[in-house]
């Protein structure tokens, strides 16, 4: 959540929505309502333009002695700087890859080289499998113990006592998600980092689901690694990894011989998706522009427009912080409306935090089931009415198995991000009520 304590000026939703061309579509005469952000968000026009401009103008490999190759090198450096502002780290601590899963396999292989018998790895029941299986496979290869941090079943939050009790002097790595892509729980990652570091363990954070909802600050978290995917926060299909410089230098990547030994490139396998990297800068600039338009939180804590001088003097990081403060304010309003409405629907069960006094422990991702309907039936009926939701386990397989919903279709997942509206929530609730009854 935003680091600043002053109030957030409100989001200009008309401006926001005008940036995303796909939001204007219709399905069977209904407005297309994108409630599938957890599976991948829509992109602003400027991301589409950046990708096609790169392909039209500069499409080249890196490191060549000619103009378009030099432009490509410069473009990648710009994207690294943009992601460094987004995550709050240095540009040489940013590694690009095809997606979070691939990057996590790369890092887990390298860390695995240093894991010895007697060491332990801790994973959680709540995580997406991309932050579980790579570590289970390292443990299997190295013959070491895996410990599982369990959840409180009633609200799908991590059982922190259980987690703390399973970290000890043998723990080499704690793998934890920042937010659950299934039930929306936000985990106390900073506290987990403190516990792990006190025992001498590294922390690998999966921030894929947190990225669209909350400001990420790796400096404040002090985590060792953090992975995210730009397609979940309004950018192209790419993965991005933050690694502390000391770790990126110390661990030995699996890599081909001609690849450089210099960080961060030594962690990047083969030729990257240059056009998508061009889209990443545009995506970060979109978020920063939302913040610039707001001018950042006002120092006096009141809502309102800042002066144009205040707008232009904002650093990109400060602009990103301002944008997330406004995203949070708007998402919170949708969260309250959504939760109040879901509770009125007969036969509907909500998984995750439902108590409004604990809404800071969740984001706007809702996992529900309705008696007498499979999640697939619900998603299909909603889809026919123009509501894009998802059904199943979304790879949070350990959670759906643990809650015994895996064999009966998992959950229906409804995911709201900042470009959704209170009207989307009202219409979705009306459709769900109609389907449920
Ligand atoms: C929480 C979470 N972690 C990891 C992933 C995997 O990300 P990627 O598709 O970039 O590998 C996802 C994808 O849905 C996710 O939601």
Image (cartoon, rainbow, N blue to C red):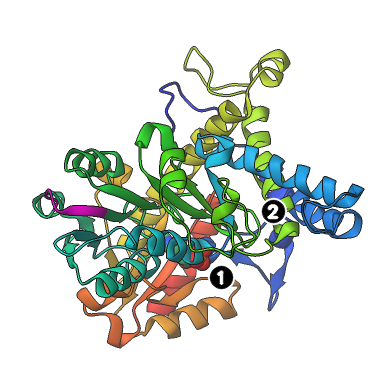
Residue occupying image coordinates x 53% and y 35%: 326
Residue 387, disc: 1
Q: Which residue is mark 2?
A: 277
Instruction: Name the residue furthest front.
Output: 257
Report the number of discs.
2
Q: Nearer the viewer, residue 340 or 244?
A: 244
How packed mark 2 is, by other alpha carbons closer than 10 Å (few <14, some 14-19, many 20 or more), is: many
Q: Quadrant of the N terminus?
A: top left
Residue 150, position in %: x, y?
16, 62
Compared with residue 81, is residue 242 higher up or lower down, i.e. above or below? below
Residue occupying image coordinates x 83% and y 54%: 54
Q: Earlier in the sequence, mark 1 or mark 2?
A: 2
Compared with residue 146, is residue 218 higher up or lower down, i.e. above or below? above
- Write the start and end of the magenta stretch as one range: 167-173
Residue 106, position in %: x, y?
46, 63
Residue occupying image coordinates x 71% and y 40%: 78
Asked whether mark 1 lies closer than 8 Å to ligand 1, one says: no
- Looking at the image, residue 67 sits to the left or right of residue 149; the answer is right
């Amino acid at each position: 959540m935003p680091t600043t304590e002053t109030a957030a000026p409100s989001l200009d939703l008309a401006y926001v929505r005008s940036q995303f061309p796909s939001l204007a579509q219709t399905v069977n005469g209904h407005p297309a309502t994108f409630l599938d952000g957890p599976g991948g968000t829509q992109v602003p026009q400027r991301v589409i333009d950046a990708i096609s401009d790169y392909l039209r103008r500069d499409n080249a490999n890196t490191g060549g002695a000619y103009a378009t190759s030099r432009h490509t090198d410069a473009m990648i450096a710009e994207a690294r700087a943009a992601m460094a502002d987004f995550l709050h780290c240095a540009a040489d601590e940013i590694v690009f890859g095809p997606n979070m899963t691939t990057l996590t396999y790369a890092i887990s292989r390298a860390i695995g080289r240093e894991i010895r018998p007697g060491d332990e790895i801790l994973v959680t029941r709540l995580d997406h499998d991309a932050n579980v299986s790579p570590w289970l496979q390292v443990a299997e290869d190295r013959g070491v113990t895996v410990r599982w941090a369990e959840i409180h079943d009633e609200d799908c939050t991590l059982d922190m006592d259980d987690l703390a009790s399973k970290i000890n002097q043998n723990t080499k790595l704690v793998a934890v998600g920042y937010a659950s892509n299934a039930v929306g729980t936000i985990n106390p990652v900073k506290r987990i980092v403190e516990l792990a570091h006190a025992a001498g363990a590294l922390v690998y954070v999966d921030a894929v689901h947190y990225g669209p909802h909350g400001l990420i600050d790796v400096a404040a978290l002090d985590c060792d690694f953090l992975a995210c995917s730009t397609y979940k926060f309004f950018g192209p299909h790419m993965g991005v990894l933050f690694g502390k410089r000391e770790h990126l230098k110390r661990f030995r990547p699996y890599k081909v011989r001609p690849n450089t030994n210099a960080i961060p490139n030594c962690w990047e396998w083969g030729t990257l998706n240059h056009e998508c990297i061009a889209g990443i800068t545009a995506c970060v600039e979109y978020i920063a522009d939302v913040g610039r338009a707001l001018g950042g939180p006002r120092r006096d804590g009141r809502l309102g427009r800042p002066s144009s001088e205040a707008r232009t003097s904002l650093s990109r990081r400060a602009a990103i912080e301002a944008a997330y403060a406004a995203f949070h304010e708007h998402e919170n309003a949708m969260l309250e409306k959504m939760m109040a409405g879901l509770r009125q629907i007969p036969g509907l069960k909500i998984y995750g935090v439902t108590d409004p006094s604990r809404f800071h422990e969740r984001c706007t991702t809702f996992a529900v089931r309705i008696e007498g309907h499979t999640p697939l039936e619900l998603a299909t009926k909603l889809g026919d009415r123009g509501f894009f939701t998802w059904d199943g386990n979304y790879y949070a397989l350990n959670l759906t198995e643990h809650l015994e919903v895996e064999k009966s279709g998992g959950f229906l997942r409804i995911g709201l991000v900042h470009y959704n509206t209170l009207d989307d929530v009202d219409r979705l609730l009306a459709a769900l009520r109609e389907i449920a009854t």
